[in-house]
Amino acid sequence: MGKKSRIARPKGELERELREQVELLEHACASFDSGLEAIGKHIALSLRVLLHHRGKSQALLEQLGLRNGYFYDSAGALNPRNLLTECNLVMFQIGPEGARYLPLVAAGGSPSAPKLAPFAEWWNEPVLKDNKGRLLSRRELVGNVADTDGGAHVDPELEEAFMDLSRNNSLGWIFQGNDIAEPLKGRPELACMRQIASEVLLTLKRRHPKVFGVGPGHDA
């Protein structure tokens, strides 16, 4: 069978695709905020479509010239002097049934003067350190969820650091109260997906607002 011919998409079609991807991401974020935590896997897949650029996999934002430049950074750099675990993309909320991981955006609102970071730094620098000192970046978090843990694929094996984060409480965060001590509820890796999505949406609203309409999740 001969090689099938391929035709380049016109830029206008790429713009339409970006509008659709933003709409999908906004709706997924709204579903996450309404309590559907597993939708974080679909958030990871949308982030991969927008941002992952390697080999034949070309990021949509790269095709549109929007991947370089500065991105909203809600986490900041890890503290090299901190001997404890860190994950500045998430927070926890204490309720009657214990404490639960939540994305920072769950606290409501956005800083009036957010920190901005060059894309390569934002995407590749570590934002999480576990109890064995292993580091994970946004790129690695998104890739693990999207490529191996239910976003686009379910692999029979997972990277050890990601397995420990998502299954074995490698952040080591514990809720203590009412005579109980237990790991925080919820899935930190999916809370990270929601927070990264909020950063991407805010970045696009500042740099390319014409792709946004009115709908759920419009406040990132």
Image (cartoon, rainbow, N blue to C red):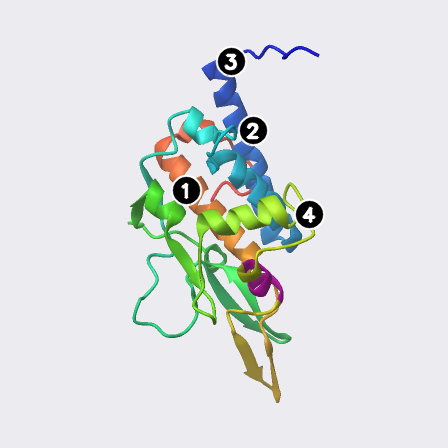
Residue 30: tell me if it is visible: no
Magenta residue span = 162-167
- Up-down relation of residue 164 to residue 65 (above or below): below
First in sequence: mark 1 vs mark 2: 2
Query: Which of 14 and 209 lies nearest the eye of the viewer?
Result: 14
Amino acid type at image mark 1: Leu
Q: Which residue is located at x 56 percent, y 45 percent?
A: 44
Q: Are marks 4 and 3 in contact (CB under 8 Å)?
A: no
Instruction: Label 3: state its secondary structure.
Output: loop
Q: Is the stretch drawn in magenta largely helix, strand or loop?
A: helix
Amino acid type at image mark 3: Ala
Q: Quadrant of residue 80?
A: bottom left
Query: Which of 160 and 165 lies nearest the eye of the viewer?
Result: 160
The residue identified by callout 2 is: 20
Q: CA distance from mark 3 to mark 2?
A: 19 Å
Amino acid type at image mark 2: Glu
First in sequence: mark 4 vs mark 3: 3
Instruction: Label 1: state its secondary structure.
Output: helix
Q: Position of residue 162 (x, y in %)?
A: 55, 58
First in sequence: mark 3 vs mark 2: 3
Q: Position of residue 13 (x, y in %)?
A: 52, 17
Query: Which of 150 and 206 lies nearest the eye of the viewer?
Result: 150
Q: CA distance from mark 1 to mark 2?
A: 16 Å
- Residue 154, numbered label: 4
- Up-down relation of residue 179 to residue 81 (above or below): below
The residue identified by callout 3 is: 8
Q: Which residue is located at x 34 percent, y 72 percent?
A: 82
- Residue 202, numbered label: 1
Q: Position of residue 153 (x, y in %)?
A: 66, 43
Q: CA distance from mark 4 to mark 3?
A: 31 Å
Instruction: Label 2: state its secondary structure.
Output: helix
